[in-house]
Image (cartoon, grey):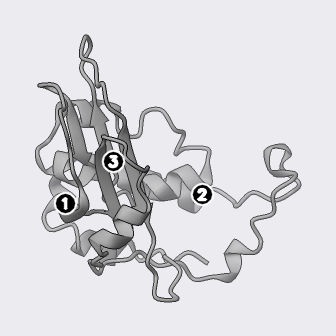
C-alpha cells in the first residue's frame, strides 16, 4: 500500500516544516489515518475498484532525475509558441522549463518555490478547495504536497499564449 513515512518526508523539507502550509499537511495526514479507502460499495466509486492500486507499496520519489531536452521536445506541440513548465517525478525541472512573454505580475512556477517565499496567494488558497477531511486521496495528496505547478494570473491580466504543463514519471520500476 502507500508508504506513510511522514517523518522521512519531513526531514527532506529542508526547513519547510516551519511554514504554515506544513500544519495543513499534518492535519491532512491525520484525516487520512481516520478515513477508509473507497470500495465499489461506495456510490461514487461503484464502477472503479482501487484494489489493484493497493497491491503496491508506493513511496515518494526523492532523487532528482534528469530528462533530455530531446525527450521533452518530443512531447511538445509542433511549431507552437508557448510557455512550458516541466515536472519530473513531481519536482519542478527549471532546466526544462521555458517561460515566454508573461505579463508583469503573472507567476508561473513551482509550488515548492512559492512556499519558500511565503507567497500570500498560495497560502490563502492551499488546501481550501479540495476536501482533505472527507476524501482519502485528497488527504493523502495534501499531506505529501511538496511541489507542483503554481500559476497565478492577477485580475485584469491576460496571458495570450498557452502554458504547456508536462508531468513526467520516471520510476526505474518503482511505484512513485
Report if the CB atoms under discs 3 and 2 are less than 8 Å apart. no
Q: Where 84 falls versus 73 (above or below)?
A: above
Q: CA distance from mark 3 to mark 2?
A: 28 Å
Q: Residue shown at 37%/42% (left/top)?
A: 80
Q: In the image, is 102 to the left or to the right of 1? A: left
Q: CA distance from mark 1 to mark 2?
A: 37 Å
Q: Residues within 10 Å of mark 3 (few under 14, many from 20)?
A: many
Q: Residue shown at 14%/26% (left/top)?
A: 105
Query: Which mark's residue is nearer the viewer, 3 or 2?
Result: 3
Residue that protrudes farthest toward the top in the picture: 156
Q: Which mark is residue 149?
A: 3
Q: Which mark is residue 94?
A: 1
State the SS at label 3. strand
Q: Which residue is mark 2?
A: 34
Q: Position of residue 141 (x, y in %)?
A: 47, 56
State the SS at label 1. helix
State the SS at label 2. helix
Amino acid at each position: 500500500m502507500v508508504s506513510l513515512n511522514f517523518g522521512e518526508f519531513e526531514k527532506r523539507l529542508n526547513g519547510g516544516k516551519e511554514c504554515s502550509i506544513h500544519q495543513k499537511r499534518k492535519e491532512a495526514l491525520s484525516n487520512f489515518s481516520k478515513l477508509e479507502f473507497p470500495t465499489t460499495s461506495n456510490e461514487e466509486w461503484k464502477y472503479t475498484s482501487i484494489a489493484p492500486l493497493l497491491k503496491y507499496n508506493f513511496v515518494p520519489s526523492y532523487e532528482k532525475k534528469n530528462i533530455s531536452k530531446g525527450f521533452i521536445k518530443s512531447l511538445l506541440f509542433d511549431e507552437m509558441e508557448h510557455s512550458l513548465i516541466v515536472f519530473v517525478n513531481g519536482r519542478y525541472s527549471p532546466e526544462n522549463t521555458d517561460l515566454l512573454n508573461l505579463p508583469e505580475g503573472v507567476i508561473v512556477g513551482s509550488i515548492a518555490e512559492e512556499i519558500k517565499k511565503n507567497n500570500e496567494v498560495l497560502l490563502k488558497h492551499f488546501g481550501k478547495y479540495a476536501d482533505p477531511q472527507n476524501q482519502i486521496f485528497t488527504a493523502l495528496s495534501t499531506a505529501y504536497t511538496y511541489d507542483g505547478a503554481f500559476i497565478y494570473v492577477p485580475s485584469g491580466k491576460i496571458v495570450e499564449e498557452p502554458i504547456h504543463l508536462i508531468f513526467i514519471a520516471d520510476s526505474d520500476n518503482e511505484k512513485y
